[in-house]
Amino acid sequence: EVQLQASGGGLVQAGGSLRLSCAASGFTSDDYAIGWFRQAPGKEHEGVASFSTSDGSTLYADSVKGRFTISNDNAKTTSYLQMNSLKPEDTAVYYCAAKAGRSWLGLYMGGYDYWGQGTLVTVSS
């Protein structure tokens, strides 16, 4: 059974940084995609970043491009979302998701098969 555990959320001032982690277990293959999504209060879910473990390719939402970086550790067990230059509008519950498969990226929720619990990021102005 695939399990994802997200962590690293917290309170940070605008302009600051946070790093979220998503620990993955249960995959039968090293090839999968990791996605980070967020949901701000009163808003729809938004796909933020996606990473393919098979080739290291990445995909970012325009709203975070240049500020957020998604990566994986060499063991392919933990994904990270490094968030820099945070803005109050980045405040949201952040979720990690995963999809088994090779060379796939996506920022839409329906593309993912597995979800972790959310971690709250609050950016104060």
Image (spheres, helix red, strand yellow):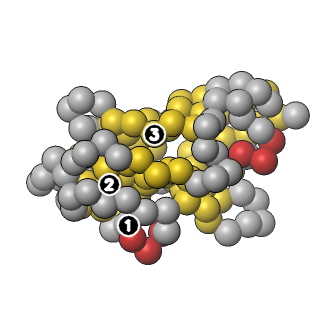
Viewer-proximal residue among 9 and 84: 84
Q: Amino acid at mark 1?
A: Tyr
Q: Secondary structure at mark 1?
A: loop
Q: Residue at x 83, y 34 (%)?
A: 124
Q: Are marks 2 and 1 in contact (CB under 8 Å)?
A: yes
Q: Residue at x 22, y 48 (%)?
A: 54
Q: Residue at x 76, y 27 (%)?
A: 15
Q: Can you give x and y, in whole percent of width and height, for residue 27 in the image?
A: 18, 52
Label 2 – label 1 distance at C-alpha:
8 Å
Numbered disc in front, either 2 or 1: 2
The residue that disc 3 covers is: 70
Local crowd at mark 1 within 10 Å, few (<14), some, or many (≥20)?
A: some
The residue that disc 2 covers is: 33
31 versus 56 height, above or below:
below
Q: Please state, as top left, top right, bottom left or bottom right, where the C terminus lies in the image.
A: top right
Q: Can you give x and y, in whole percent of width and height, for residue 69 in the image?
A: 51, 36
Q: Earlier in the sequence, mark 1 or mark 3?
A: 3
Label 1 – label 3 distance at C-alpha:
16 Å
The residue that disc 1 covers is: 112
Q: Earlier in the sequence, mark 2 or mark 3?
A: 2
**Is residue 71 visible from the viewing direction of this image?**
yes
Q: Earlier in the sequence, mark 2 or mark 1?
A: 2
Q: Quadrant of residue 76?
A: top left
Question: In the picture provided, is 32 more to the left or to the right than 93?
Answer: left
Q: Are marks 2 and 3 in contact (CB under 8 Å)?
A: no
